[in-house]
Image (tube, rainbow, N blue to C red):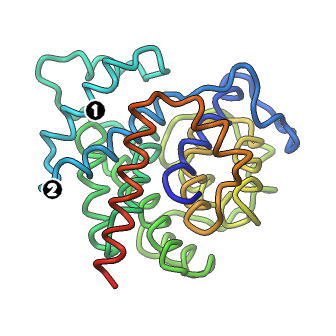
Amino acid sequence: MKGIIGAIAGDVIGSAYEFNPTRDYNFELFTPKSTFTDDTVLTMANALWLIEDQEHTYERLVEIMRDLCNRYQGRGYGGRFAQWIMDKNPQPYNSYGNGSAMRVSPVGYYALTLDEALNLAKVSAEVTHNHPEGIKGAKATAAAIFLARQGKKKDEIKEYIQNEIGYDLSRTLEQIRPDYSFNELCQTTVPEAITCYLEGFGYEDVIRLAVSLAADADTLAAIAGPIASAVWEVPSEISQPVVSLLSDEFCTTLLRFNELVAQRECLEQ
């Protein structure tokens, strides 16, 4: 299985290590603590938005995000975002947290052109994360997914992200790991997650690299994972346990979104 399951599986696998960090590459993929978090809820919100709203409006995205978050409470929402969910008049709050990047993977799969991916990523981010760095993180993630889907080589993706988005991807994971610690900012999460993809050799390898950075594990894996799953299949021994943890509603949304992407790819051809 390919597609946004790569983000969801990354979230579920990383969830047990978000506040229990590990630097052990050979960590247990699934533990009794494994579950989906806000990363998955908001990824599903973006997918549902793309399915249901052909105009891709801010207003409909806000409605869907707030509805899902209110129905899936206690999934680790950040403090300011939790206020936004409950606000009578929700407005973007100039955030540059990594939430804009963790939820944007459906855009990278839905888009038929790179410009469409960038434009939709901007909309997806701006309903909350309208700081330039918040938008930048969403654009970088969506662009990396789109380019990977198009069969671009890793060096080509790296060059685009560095030259057009403006992230420095020169550091290796070996250089990053010693001083890296938990943080929730786009500018210190997204480049590291992309680097996990660039150094990985398969879906599971990429997820293990992301989680073993011992930082915001679920979000790092939810960003790196869907780039990887644009290239490599998510193994059934990973996808099946993950899907079993999802609600029926989310399983349906996942199937509907995959069907929509397949239809759009046929139209493109």
Q: Name the residue under label 1.
A: 65
Query: For this view, does 23 lie left or right of residue 261?
Result: right
Q: Which residue is drawn at 54% across and 80% down?
A: 151
| SS under mark 1 | helix
Where does residue 2 sit, x and y in percent of width and height?
56, 60
Q: Against 65, is 267 above or below? A: below
The image quadrant where one finds the N terminus is bottom right
Question: Of the residues shown, which amino acid type is indicated by label 2?
Answer: Gln
Question: Of the residues shown, which amino acid type is indicated by label 1?
Answer: Met
Q: Residue at x 48, y 78 (%)?
A: 150
Q: Residue at x 34, y 77 (%)?
A: 266
Query: For this view, does 153 lie left or right of residue 65?
Result: right
Q: Which mark is residue 51?
A: none
Q: Within 10 Å of the Cα at label 1, are there few (<14), some (14-19), or many (20+) other Cα atoms?
A: many
Q: Distance between the residues labelled 2 and 1?
A: 16 Å
| SS under mark 2 | loop
Q: Mark 2 points at which residue?
A: 54
Which of the 4 image quarters holds residue 34? top right
Where does residue 190 sit, x and y in percent of width and height?
53, 52
Q: Against 213, is 183 above or below? A: above
Can residue 216 be seen in this snapshot?
no
